[in-house]
Image (cartoon, rainbow, N blue to C red):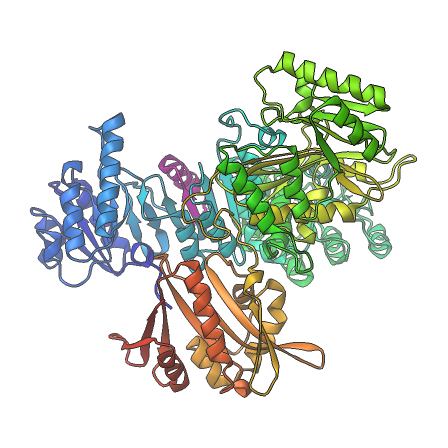
Amino acid sequence: MKKHYLTHFFEPSTIAIIGTGEGSDSIEAKLSERLKEQFKGKVWLGHPRQRSLLGGSRHYDTIDQVPGRVDLAIIVTPDSQVNEQLDRCAAVGIDSVVVLSHLDDRDGFLRNQFVESLRRQADNLGIRMWGPDCYGFVRPALGIRATLDRVDIKPGKIALISHSGAICRAVTDWANASGVGFSTIISLEQAAGVYAGDILDYLVIDQQTECILIYAEGVQDSRGFLSGLRGVARSKPVIVMKTGRHGEVAGQQLSHTGALVGNDYVFNAALERAGIVRAHSLTDLFLAARAFPIHRSVRGERIGIISHGLGPAIMACDKAYDLNLPLAELSNESSAKLASLRSMDASVNPVYSSRFGLNDEFMEACEIIAKDKGVDFLIVVLTPPRGRVVADVDERLFKIQKASFKPIVVCCMGGDNVAVIRRSLQERGIPVFSSPENAVKAAKYLTTYFKNRTYLVQAPASMAKDVHPDIEGARLIIEGVLQEGRKILNQLESRAVLKAFNIPINPSWNTHSANEALVAAESVGFPVVLKINSPDISHKVDFSGVSLNVMNAQAVRSAYKKLMDDVQEKKPDARVEGVIVEHMVTSAANRELLLGIKNDSVFGPVLVFGHGGTMVEVMNDIAISLPPLNALLAQTLIDSPKVAKMLDSFRNMPAANRVELERIILRLSEIACELPWIRNLDINPLVLDDKNAIVLDAVIEVDYLPPAQKRYEHMAIHPYPVYLETNWQLKNGLDVRIRPIRPEDAELEKSFIESLSERSRYYRFMHNVKRVTPEMLARFTQIDYHREMALVALVQENGIWQEIGVSRYVVNPDGVSCEFAVVVSDQWHRTGIGYKLMELLIEAARAKGLKFMDGIVLRDNVPMRKLARSMGFEIRDDEKDEDIVYIIKKL
């Protein structure tokens, strides 16, 4: 596998510091001295007058005199010399540069102009650059300090990515005081050619990092950002804090949907789908980080609380209720055991003891609760004891956690009297907090991570296999509207688009006179509704453009005239294209709901569901989700807003037909996937009762597409590519199913890898794979179709599917090439499966717009080299390793 381009930044073998300052107090002198003390690689100083600082062997007047390759250059010259130094770096092949030069003499426009010119220069030279005038980054365990900040940072397992250098400095100061260590601290305040998604890609394979914190001020490349988040969240927890939660939405939105959904709602929905936890303050960000070392043991959200004292137990319960964390119900067996303990004052959750010290029975009670099958999470609250304290609290809690496979979070209330216990627990890796509320908060972050990971592994298709929408018909309607210079579909056009995706529409007639309206009313049946049809009026009620419950012919004529008069008075410039007549839908079991699509400027289309009707803005009861959806995600969306409670049966009203509602939401998800022209879609109301659902009103706003936009490029999450599924037949007539891999294929993939011979596994992975770990399976099956593809070949034996081969590619960081791999089960060699899998993989890479496909193959893997040659790959020797060859194909 190729090294990630960030390896030169974060794992350099050689670092060159380029400066012009004089004396031992100069910036470059101090920076080089600190690197010499901590960094194990080579440090060169490119400076015409600083020979005495580092010794002649490591000093050179200019960067082009340095022998061998320089992985990372750090420029600290005056800003007027940065352009020249970038040119010199490019001339000797340095492509990773950090510019720490200050821009104190440049303000406002001149500063921005200079920064932009440096970015263009770096881009033209093929240099990825941090800076200028930035915090840079630090890798404490490796002794790498590409920063002017002088605070020493303790090595640890937490990585911080920040859009603010000031936050980085504040965090390092806090970390030192709190004894918290970091694997990496990175500021993205000034970066050219370096993106958050790429950094996440690097950190997912970084063995120094176990947890990632992100301070974000905005998102530009939403797909790259989400793709990176989803990739890393499969194996490492990520906690994000984003500022600007209450920013105003620019411009007046056309639809109810656009007016209600602010950017922060969308950001939350995106994080949920990516399996990410969100913190709303720096305090909470680090509170969550302290809890996440035990994230792997979380299996649910039912918490058990045991406290040394009733008051702290009640405080913990109050916070749990605030955060919607359910208290576990203890089994009768557990309650009976607790009741037999003389020290305990309660045998139900929360369990507490207020009369005795931290004794053996208290520890026994902890063990009883942890073993209870109804408890997923244990919170232990300790206060300064007044009696005897068992000597091995830390050891016993550690053993309880290990034996129960359940997470334990401890609150140590107090100061010096609990300091020893607090310190010993922390040394055992058990998270400790100073208040019951913070302990419960930590539990909430962990259980949220557990829940969001469920959404992460969902890989919905853009369309269901058993549903065949008329995509072409809907596309032609939209293109026709745009060709006429319009961006808002009229009522009939909007209904036709929905109908094309099998969404039930209330039949309607568009009429141009009172007589036509009467004929229409007689045809659809009384009572009827009359609605003004105008592309300039989206909310008809606001302009008296709706007449409800019209009962007879005379009332139709009167209603028609009144509609036309009212619109003429209230919006005289509106273009009126007629009056729509439809049957008045009435039912005692009706619920009025809102469904919609909003096109977010960052994350693309999002789906909206909530309380509908004329009071939609007042109720402000909505939930949103990023498409594509499957049944689980649709059900989650339905259950999220308060209106979900109205769907259940109450009083004399039967429960609403949730199955039909779910079906319509899935059809709406298809619209969001397949019709990228849509900017806003408003269904209000969708009327739902115990039997049926029907759309009474809809507004669709569209816009032109960017040039050469690829399929699904408008979406933040790439749907499962159902269009790549195909059937193929071997020469002996056996049918083979070839399709993209899915998360639920984990067991198939595990069996396939385990069935490979030792030699085949070695050829595929280039090392001995003796055990298929859960992490490996997650990596192989939970893929992001935006930047990787895996095609599996399946055959059916006795009604059971069996994987017999897989080909896959991963897009390289350059964005134009991909690295591939292919392996076929030993007993299926020489059947043409490998060739077919590669043929389809190459087609998929071409369709993606990739230009090259490459791979690394062991030299003695003759069958693979033969297959590559037959498919037009060029085979090259590797200059550094004679045991491998490099193969590449232009697509």
The location of residue 387, given as percent across then percent down, is: 70, 44
Q: Is residue 791 magenta?
A: no
- Indicate left or right for 348 with 816 as reference: right
Q: Write down the region rendered in magenta.
A: 160-181
Most common SS among magenta residues: helix
Viewer-proximal residue, 816 or 544? Answer: 544
Q: Looking at this view, name the residue that lies furthest to the top.
A: 569
- Indicate left or right for 152 with 23 as reference: right
Viewer-proximal residue, 330 or 122? Answer: 122
From the image, which quarter does the C terminus lie in? Answer: bottom left
The location of residue 214, given as percent across then percent down, is: 46, 44
The location of residue 429, given as percent across then percent down, is: 55, 54
Q: Does residue 422 appear in this view?
A: no
Viewer-proximal residue, 342 or 202? Answer: 202
The location of residue 226, given as percent across then percent down, is: 49, 49
Q: Is residue 178 magenta?
A: yes
From the image, which quarter does the N terminus lie in? Answer: bottom left
Q: Does residue 364 appear in this view?
A: yes
Write the residue at 26% across / 61% down.
Answer: 13
